[in-house]
Image (tube, rainbow, N blue to C red):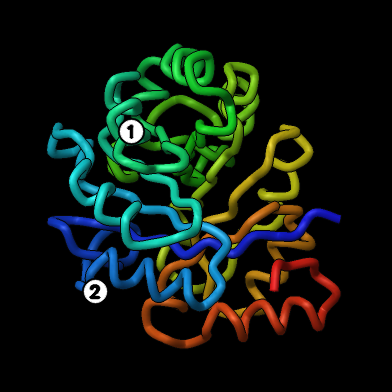
Amino acid sequence: MLAKRIIPCLDVKGGRTVKGIHFEGLRDVGDPVDLGRHYAHEGADELVYLDISATREERHTFTALVSRIADGINIPFTVGGGISTIDDAARLLDAGADKISINSAAIRRPELIDEIARRYGSQFVVVAIDARLTDDGLWHATTHGGTVATDRELFSWAREAQDRGAGEILFTSMNHDGTRSGYPCDTFARLAATVSIPIIASGGAGSAADIAEVLTTGHADAALAASIFHYGEITIGALKAQLAEQGIAVRR
């Protein structure tokens, strides 16, 4: 049985780690390098850094910060936000990122997934899908940090991303992000049945029980969370101990 991964997410704006609800009402929670080093020491399996305003501000992702992160931590990390070309991806991978995450640019031009996967391999490509459940009963993918709705539907878009060469899907429920109300596990289970590549669950973690549920009932391969780690409500070591007690395979 493959071990489930625990991945702290660090949303970055203006060089600082921030956290809010639905990407709004942002609060400063610390230096991204210091936090990353802290989580690595606690036992995080990977880290995800998202430059949450890069796309909206039409600028490139924080390359200099990525170099600092690579020098400061010893676990794999993924970087996303503002990546719109293969040159953007190359710059971040050269700066030390282990994977890149693409979202808005992939929806705008899906061929970008093929191009990056062809040059670097699928293992370097995470396709992030920020989707919202709408009144029509469908999960619609959004862009620009969840602010712009699209006609892309979660499950068909995830399948296309996989077919184009994505190595992982990072699905964030915009309905649940920052609410600490738990993950939409039925949706994650359906997504897991739709694609064969690993799924990272994001959006809604409020407790160890929420994470255990999405890793089992939701069939996610990894759980990404922010608030419960940033505010010190549970350590990664304590979380992994609770998961292991429930028979969930984790790296200790």
Which residue in the structure is indicated by mark 1? Answer: 94
In the rendered structure, the answer to whether residue 34 lies left or right of residue 107 reads left
- Return the x and y of residue 114 as percentages of the image width and height: 51, 14
Residue 43: give its label: none
- Front residue of 181 and 59: 59
Q: For residue 30, which numbered disc appears in the image?
A: 2
Amino acid type, label 2: Gly
Residue 161 in the image, given as x and y percentages of width and height: 57, 24
| Quadrant assignment, res 106 | top left
> Considering only vertical position in the picture, is 108 above or below 123?
above
Q: Residues within 10 Å of mark 1 (few under 14, many from 20)?
A: few
Residue in the image at 28% along x and 20% along y: 87
Point out the frontmost of discs 1 and 2: 1
The amino acid type of the residue labelled 1 equals Asp
Sequence-earlier tag: 1 or 2: 2
Residue 88's place in the image compared with 34, above or below, is above
Circle 2: element type = strand
